[in-house]
Image (cartoon, helix red, strand yellow):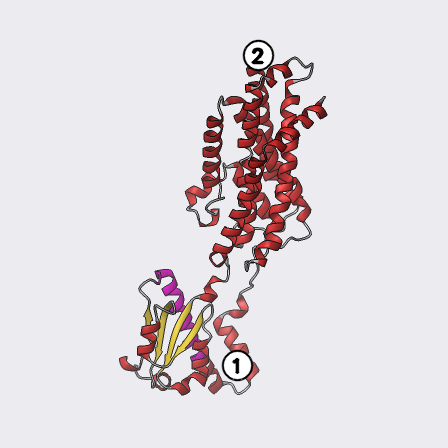
Amino acid sequence: MLFTIIKKELLLVRRDIHALMVLFIMPMAFILIMSLSLQDTFQQSAADKIKIGLVFANSKEKDTPLGKSLLKLSGFQTLVYPERDVLFRRTQADNLAAAIILPEKFRASLQRSKKVAPQDRLQLYYSPTTPSHLRKLILASVIQALASYQLDKMLARMLPDPALQRQQKQKFTGGGLINQQELYGERQLQPTSVQQSVPAWLIFSIFFVVIPIATTFLTEKQHGTLQRLKTLPVPNSYFLVGKLVPYLGINLIQTALMFLVGIYLVPALGGEGLVLHSNAWLLLPMSISVSVTAISFALLVAVLVKTTEQATTIGGISNLLLAAAGGIMVPTFIMPEIMQHIARYSPMNWGLEGFLTILLRQGDLVAILPEMGKLLVLAGLLFCLAVVAYRRRLNA
């Protein structure tokens, strides 16, 4: 009997081809648009693209150790201009964050112990749009370059052996006291645009299953199908399970296609492709958890509403609110602290964090169990409420 009910639901799903197209086309469009549009924004090495203009009053200074250190400021791209006027004219066109002018007598003034004259000092100009935190970073990089140059000169006079010079420089700068490591597995690890977009908009579209489910449910009610089903000697839960299984299959197909879009179509259009690792099999249980929760929510809405308009309004608004608060539309890592706290209560955020644990943090099954557990518990609660509401409707 359950198989017959599932078969009936598949026939209804096949007839509503337009709703199915929306479930597949909508996330594909969002994934492509957001992955390509926000690629530079999500790049962890975005600081490498910040441009700084540089003018040498004496062109020969470019080949000196000081000039080379200024040309290789850590975290910035340095562009050389022939003169000050050209640099200032090109600041806006070339999107420069700052401009450095090295006076002709600057290097010579460093070697003198007396105070450097104002006209011989290095000139640092900021673009009006450069934020204060970036100005501090640029200033620190310039100071570091100058300090490194002066330290090299001092050590060269004191120690003839280059190996000893490098050893002492490392000691003075503290380089040997720092151990750099990735916070691998931590939630603060920032995803790329495609790692964020694929699971985020997939989850968003999975929850939109509420509209086709509610539509078919109301159609059955209007045609008297529910009253005829009431005469069958089967539990009421069978009818809801019969709706759950077909849409679960649709969501899994949807999941596979959207990840294929991220892996192959996004890089084909010039974006960064999605890379799966050996733990990619965990996408299946995570997808099932998200799908079951979304379908259970859809079933509850379907048995409570009385018209298609109500289903569209309630389902659409609830999905938008859950997505906005859950890190789907705005990533949680750029949210203020209060919104990050609110996001933890959104089931969409549970699903997104589970997918990011797999894709970004390369977590194992144990790592995603908290998110899966919360989703499945919520799904069970919603499904039970849907069964109770369905039984009351049949008895009404």
- Say which residue appears at 45% left-offset and 78% top-offset: 69
Range covered by the magenta-colored residues: 130-151
Q: Quadrant of residue 146?
A: bottom left
Q: Is residue 184 magenta?
A: no
Alpha carbon distance from label 1 to label 2: 89 Å
Circle 1 crowding by C-alpha within 10 Å: few under 14, some 14–19, many from 20: many
- Where does the image place residue 236, in percent across and percent down from the top left? 64, 18
- Where does the image place residue 53, in percent across and percent down from the top left? 38, 73
Callout 1 amino acid: Gln
Element on which disc 2 rests: helix
- Say which residue appears at 43% left-offset and 83% top-offset: 62
In the rendered image, the vertical position of residue 369 relative to residue 197, given as above or below = above
Foreground tag (1 vs 2): 2
Q: Which residue is mark 1?
A: 165
Magenta stretch: helix, strand or loop mostly: helix
Residue 131 shown left or right of residue 148 in the figure = left
